[in-house]
Amino acid sequence: MDRDVVVNIENVTVRYHHFEAVKNISFDVKKGDVIALIGANGSGKTTLIKALLGLLRVSQGTIWKADGLQIGYLPQNTSLQDRFFPATVEEVVSIGLLAKRKFPKFLNRDDRKKILQTLDMLRIPHLLKKRIGELSGGQQQRVLLARALVSAPEILILDEPTSALDHSMRKHFFEIVKKLNEKLNITVILVTHDIVSAGDYINRVVYLDQVIKFNDTFDAFCEHPELSPFVHTHPLKHTEGVKS
Ligand SMILES: Nc1ncnc2c1ncn2[C@@H]1O[C@H](COP(=O)(O)OP(=O)(O)O)[C@@H](O)[C@H]1O
Ligand SMILES: [Mg+2]
């Protein structure tokens, strides 16, 4: 296998009982890739991500990951308010470190330093002691990104991270992800309906509809006669409601 390959998905099918959510999926993720995983609601994007993370069992096929590959994950529809109220930003981000640890489950000096460094990198160090209920949607999403990043992952998986954000915050969020990729060489898998905002730095588009319908560069995607309308009339407005 190519030395740069960090994840290899081969003929993967995932079923819920008898229902095949994704069918016979094959693709590689290479170090430094920024992959946009797109497709309509219900096309199997989250299912595939969860299988990759080992949260769902693969019914057929194999998923190979590079030895010791560290993955940071920002799940879909995570409302900080509901899940972590009334935690502070520091507490929420610390979960990204402590969840992987067996014992003891408390923060040492080194952890606190890592948390602050991560918040610094995302330009929100001043939020450290804030309660998450006080934050805006854009700030909350950055805190969730910090939680995914604090353990210094090699690959970052973001499942519709900007769906609750308005256009300008969305742009801003994608700028951050771009920097993480360019400066820290973090590999990114981005599930999104907004490949227009993300377009200038994704190097591969994987278009899912139970099976893979397309897997090529962003430019090739834009030029594709049947898929290019997706770029202009992508279902963003219909599927991504603004949440409180
Ligand atoms: N836990 C589950 N049990 C049964 N069916 C599920 C479950 N999760 C998702 N599905 C179904 O699998 C299909 C793919 O869902 P999902 O992976 O969430 O799609 P997407 O993330 O692209 O919107 C949908 O038809 C969905 O209803
Ligand atoms: Mg989903």
Image (tube, grey):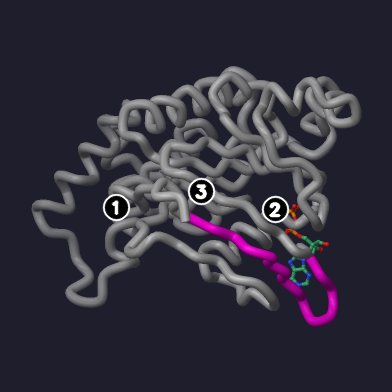
Amino acid residing under circle 2: Lys
The picture places residue 181, in percent across and down from the top left corner, at 41, 32
Q: Secondary structure at mark 1?
A: loop
**Is residue 46 in the magenta section?**
no
Disc 3 residue type?
A: Ile
Q: Earlier in the sequence, mark 1 or mark 3?
A: 1
Between marks 1 and 3, how big is the CA–CA gap?
A: 13 Å
Q: Identify the residue under disc 1.
A: 151
Horizontal side of residue 227 vs 128, given as left or right: right
The 10 Å Cα crowd at callout 2, few under 14, some 14 to 19, many 20 or more, is many
Q: Secondary structure at mark 2?
A: helix
Q: Badge 2 is on which residue?
A: 45
Q: Is residue 38 at all visible to an observer of this figure?
A: no
Q: Which mark is residue 157?
A: 3
The answer to which quarter of the image holds residue 95 is bottom left
Say whether residue 17 is magenta.
yes
Name the spot of residue 4 as percent of width and height, x first.
41, 46
Can the viewer see residue 113 in this picture? yes
Rendered residue at 27%/39% (across/down): 118
Under mark 1, the amino acid is: Ser
Quadrant in which the C terminus appears: top right
Question: Magenta span: helix, strand or loop, mainly?
Answer: strand
**Picture residue at 79% right of the left edge, 81% below the top:** 17
Q: Residues within 10 Å of mark 1 (few under 14, many from 20)?
A: many
Q: Is mark 2 within 8 Å of ligand 1?
A: yes
At 90% from the left and 30% from the top, the residue drawn is 226
Q: Residue at x 59, y 18 (%)?
A: 168
Q: Nearer the viewer, residue 226 or 18?
A: 226
Region rendered in magenta: 7-21
Measured Cα–Cα span from mark 1 to mark 2: 24 Å
